Amino acid sequence: QVQLVESGGGLVQPGGSLRLSCSASGFPFSRYSMNWYRQGPGKERELVADISGFGTTTNYADFVKGRFTISRDNAKNTVYLQMNSLKPEDTAVYYCMTYYNDRNRWGKGTLVTVSS
């Protein structure tokens, strides 16, 4: 059974940092790309960043380039999102996702609130 469990969200001031983690199980983790999405209040879910199975290729949405870094530790079956220089507009529920066995697999998300 595929499970994705996000953690690390919380309340942070503008300009601050957080590191999100997503612990994965139930599939051969290192063989699959992983994605971070987010959904802000009243907004549609959007792709933030993705990383290839062995971590050699990463892609970022323009709105996070230079501020966020996606990485993975295949020995720990975990993908990370380091978020720096956070802005109020980064407030959202952050989800990790992978495409496995012909379906998108989602975690339940972790809430990030950027506010003073």
Image (cartoon, rainbow, N blue to C red):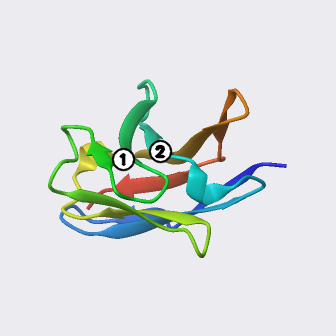
Task: Report crowding for label 2: few under 14, some 14 to 19, many 20 or more residues within 10 A (C-alpha).
Answer: many
Q: Nearer the viewer, residue 64 or 30?
A: 30
Image side of residue 27 versus residue 32, left or right: right
The kind of secondary structure element at disc 2 is: strand
Which residue is drawn at the image coordinates 45% and 46% (left, top)? 36
Which residue is drawn at the image coordinates 23% and 64% (left, top)? 84
The x, y position of residue 18, in whole percent, is 36, 68
* Amino acid type at mark 1: Thr
Vertical order, 34 against 13 (above or below) = above
Q: Nearer the viewer, residue 100 or 41?
A: 100
Quarter assignment of residue 75? bottom right
Q: Residue 115 has which mark?
A: none
Vertical order, 3 against 59 (above or below) = below
Vertical order, 47 against 27 (above or below) = above
* Quadrant that contains the C terminus: bottom left
The number of numbered discs placed on residues in the rendered structure image is 2
The kind of secondary structure element at disc 1 is: loop
The x, y position of residue 48, in whole percent, is 35, 42
Name the residue furthest right.
1
Quarter assignment of residue 44? top left
Marked residue nearer the N-terminal end (2 or 1): 2
Q: Nearer the viewer, residue 111 or 109?
A: 109
Image side of residue 58 versus residue 19, left or right: left
Q: Which residue is mark 2?
A: 35
Name the residue furthest left.
66
Which residue is drawn at the image coordinates 43% and 33% (left, top)? 41
* Amino acid type at mark 2: Asn
The x, y position of residue 114, in whole percent, is 32, 56
Task: Report crowding for label 1: few under 14, some 14 to 19, many 20 or more residues within 10 A (C-alpha).
Answer: many
Q: CA distance from mark 2 to mark 1?
A: 18 Å
Which residue is drawn at the image coordinates 39% and 35% (left, top)? 47
Q: Which residue is mark 1?
A: 91
